[in-house]
Image (tube, rainbow, N blue to C red):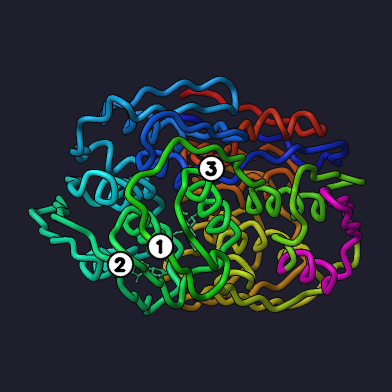
Amino acid sequence: MKQMIIEGNKTLTGEILIGGAKNSAVALIPASILADGKSILDNVPNISDRDALIDILEILNCDVTLDKDHLEIDTTNLKNTVIDEEHSRKLRASYYFMGALLGKEKYVEIYIPGGCNIGARPIDIHIEGFKALGAEVKTEGNKYILKADKLRGTDIYLRFQSVGATINLMFASVLAEGKTVIHNAAKEAEIENIADYLISMGAKIEGAGTDDITIYGVEKLHGGKITVIPDRIEAGTYIILGALVGKNLCIKNIIPKHLEALTSKLKDMASDITINKDNIVISKVDNLKPTNIKTLVYPGFPTDIGQPMAVLLTQANGTSLFEETIWENRMGHVPSLNKMGANITVKGMSSMTIGPSKLHGCEVVATDLRGGASLVLAGLTATGTTIINDVEHILRGYEDIDIKLKNVGAKIEIREI
Ligand code: EPZ
């Protein structure tokens, strides 16, 4: 088990370089299965979810070479289409092998995926879509068996704009016969990055990033090439950190357009924020205004930034209301923040924060990835020492977090216990 120790209340200044987007990379890596031959990915983040997906590729007998953020995946020797329970459960994104293997091999055996405990996380929309394309889907205990003689393009309406289902159905339809239209598709920035990768392999996709994505099936895909877009959630987390303890903290290598929901909120709160072409510079101010936030699908306020933002609300002068609309169990960080001195009351999927609160360090537990990130922000803001247990949750999605924070003046260590 890993533990993080933070000596808080230090002013952070300098530059934090943002890595490739976790939620893009975890789909781009499985997407490589769809190509015949070698594909190349650049700007792949150094996170444990990446390693878990590479392990699965190796089980499938793909050849994988990783050199820093450069990943090459060769599917020439692909032979296996069965992913065991242990590897399926290591992360949520293992489910992208459903669409990718079904699309390529027309057969996959895989178990219920893992991932953060932030709600029920059903995959019924994915399954309905696979069936609409002509797949037969069987379950045996925790195992899914998906097979098809042939996949045929069709019209699929998603009852919710699910990120995962949109991506999985793109994967299952790029090699299907004829035209597929995914209606009410998710529009997250990552969807366009993934479509661009498939297009680089020879796929015919129109409308990614809009409500309707049209896919014209092709017979084969060749090796592709993509650069993973910057991680807007990692960036958002550090931008909030700048508002908490920054002095001209510069968050670099970002696409500001992907962060507009956050930056417009920070402006409403009277933060000291400057938005440049590919970076944002932010400093702490004393009179932060409270605000109300409701999470929404992209381009609304991202659910994944809700937990880091909870820390900033504890420092605003007055009462802020927060409403989560995507995941029913995304308040795991609140008991720890309250233990550190915050005044947050939770009712169902909503919370009320009365600020400002003086946070003090103590021993807390990361319950999930973004909840864990919020504890890091709180620890860096608090006086005294904060000890965060179960840091593995955080390392799933934040590359080199200790190194990046040390570089801007934080006192932070990760140790094995
Ligand atoms: C992706 O999850 C991200 N994960 C999540 O990030 C993110 O919170 C979420 O999108 C929303 O932006 C990855 O990309 C690996 P959804 P995903 O399908 O695809 C319901 C993080 O912290 N739903 O858009 O699983 C579901 O229960 C993680 O980085 C169904 O009912 O999210 C939820 O309420 C956490 N049936 C809503 O839709 C389905 O078949 C949104 O889920 C699928 C989803």
Disc 3 target residue: 397
Residue 68: % across, % down: 59, 22
The answer as to whether callout 3 falls within 8 Å of ligand 1 is yes
Residue at mark 1 to residue at mark 2: CA–CA distance: 8 Å
Residue 139: % across, % down: 11, 57
Q: Which numbered dot is residue 153? A: 2
Q: Which residues are magenta?
A: 261-285
Disc 1 target residue: 216
Amino acid carrying label 1: it is Tyr
Which of the pair 105/96 is nearer the observer?
A: 105
Q: Dot 3, crowdedness within 10 Å: few (<14), some or many (≥20)?
A: many
Find out whether the residues at labels 1 and 2 contact each other: C-beta distance under 8 Å: yes
- Identify the residue shown where x is 49% and y is 45%: 365
Residue 58: % across, % down: 31, 26
Residue 294: % across, % down: 61, 77
Classify mark 2: helix, strand or loop.
loop
